[in-house]
Amino acid sequence: MMLFIEFKGSIHEVQVTQEGMLIGRSSKALPIQDARCSKKHAVLFETADGRLCILDLTSANGTFLNGKEISCAEVKAGSKIQVGDSVLTLLSVDSERTQFNLVERGWPGAWNCVPRR
């Protein structure tokens, strides 16, 4: 799944792989240099039915979606994701279905994460 994200005035094209896309200071796809952002802050992933979701990885300062703190939530075009003091805006999603099992990756809370429609 290809995402287009606005961050600090630039548009970034990033790929959500089978492992999901890590958001944080140690992210290879989109490193966030923000002292209030954890190294492994959150992960974006695609559900089996093609929805894009974000999972907070028990970060110290929380993950916010459109101004509300979340543990896991569905993300849509236009959504604003805040990690630390940094805000990322999801501009669009180009979905090429990828299916994977976050539980196998060991992400905390992944088993109960997928929001109900």
Image (spheres, rainbow, N blue to C red):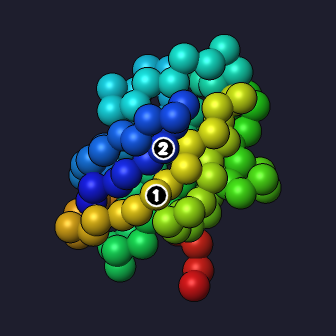
Q: Nearer the viewer, residue 16 or 106?
A: 16
Q: What residue occupies the far bottom of the structure in this picture? A: 117
Q: Position of residue 98 (x, y in %)?
A: 23, 63
Relative side of 53 to 86, left or right: left
Q: What residue occupies the far front of the structure in this picture? A: 9
Q: Position of residue 66 (x, y in %)?
A: 71, 57
Establish if 76 lies above or below 62: below
Q: Position of residue 43 (x, y in %)?
A: 47, 44
Q: Which residue lies at the image location 49% right of the left edge and 54% below the top edge?
A: 90
Q: Nearer the viewer, residue 60 or 25?
A: 25
Q: Are marks 2 and 1 in contact (CB under 8 Å)?
A: yes
Relative side of 3 to 110, left or right: left
Q: For mark 1, does the 10 Å Cα neighbourhood hold few (<14), some (14 to 19), or many (20 or more) residues?
A: some
Of the two numbered discs 2 and 1 on the same chain, state the one appearing first in sequence: 2
The disc labelled 2 sits on which kind of residue? Glu
**Res 58 visible:** no
Relative side of 83 to 47, left or right: right
The tag on residue 6 is 2
Could you tell me which quadrant the C terminus lies in?
A: bottom right
The tag on residue 10 is none
SS for dot 2: strand
Image quadrant in which you'd find residue 30: top left
Q: Which residue lies at the image location 52% right of the left edge and 35% below the top edge?
A: 9
The tag on residue 91 is 1
Relative side of 64 to 113, left or right: right
